[in-house]
Image: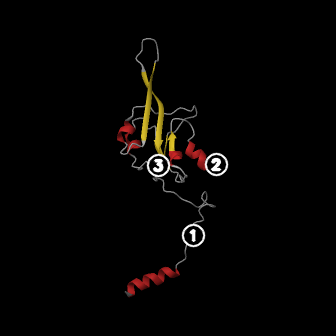
Amino acid sequence: MLTGMSVTIQEFFTKKVTEQYPENRGTTLVVAERFRGELVMPHDENNEHACTGCGICQMNCPNGTIKVITKMIETEEGAKPKRTLDQYYYDLGMCSFCNLCVISCPSDAIKFQNSFENSVFTRDKLKETLNKEGSKLREKIKSN
């Protein structure tokens, strides 16, 4: 019992550190590099992404967070139709952040971003279309 009390007394006299979160989130807040906060589909300078619409991420998602909708387009005269991505839906509210979708993607088209401020009032705002540049959720959070 004396050992436990000595630890308690030592902790009582150590200096406490308070993180001033909302005010200083850009200067003092450090988020681990491997933290998985939100799934994103990076776009290049021409607003194009690397997703081919194969659907492997959708198949590997354990709880149906991802929905990939593809369409067939004609490329040239007499050529075989090509499958392209039409819509890529992601529900952040259902995601278990297991990273199986990112690992299984053959074209490295999706990745987890380091953001963690995803609080909203309704779950419908957590649903996103990733193949469009600029996420509704990120725009909503930045406006608040």
Q: Is residue 98 left or right of 129 when viewed as pictured?
A: left
Residue 27, quarter of picture: bottom right
- Residue positioned most to the top: 78
Residue 15, quarter of picture: bottom right
Q: What residue appears at the point 38 percent right and 85 percent down from the top-left corner?
A: 3
Q: Secondary structure beneath disc 2?
A: helix
Q: What residue appears at the point 60 percent right and 59 percent down from the top-left corner?
A: 25
Rate crowding at label 2 as few (under 14), some (14 to 19) or many (20 or more) other CA atoms within 10 Å. few
Q: Nearer the viewer, mark 3 or mark 1?
A: 3
Label annotation for residue 93? 3
Q: Is residue 57 left or right of 130 when viewed as pictured?
A: left
Res 71 seen here: yes
Q: Nearer the viewer, mark 1 or mark 2?
A: 2
Residue 139 point in image, percent of width and height: 60, 45
Q: Which badge, 1 or 2, is on the more N-terminal residue?
A: 1
Q: Nearer the viewer, residue 136 or 78?
A: 136
Q: Nearer the viewer, residue 103 or 83?
A: 83
Q: Which badge, 3 or 1, is on the more N-terminal residue?
A: 1
Label annotation for residue 143? 2
Q: Nearer the viewer, mark 3 or mark 2?
A: 3
- Alpha carbon distance from label 1 to label 2: 27 Å
Q: Is residue 3 above or below residue 54?
A: below
Label annotation for residue 123? none
Question: According to the image, label 1 marks what residue?
Answer: 18
- Alpha carbon distance from label 3 to label 1: 30 Å
- Alpha carbon distance from label 3 to label 2: 20 Å
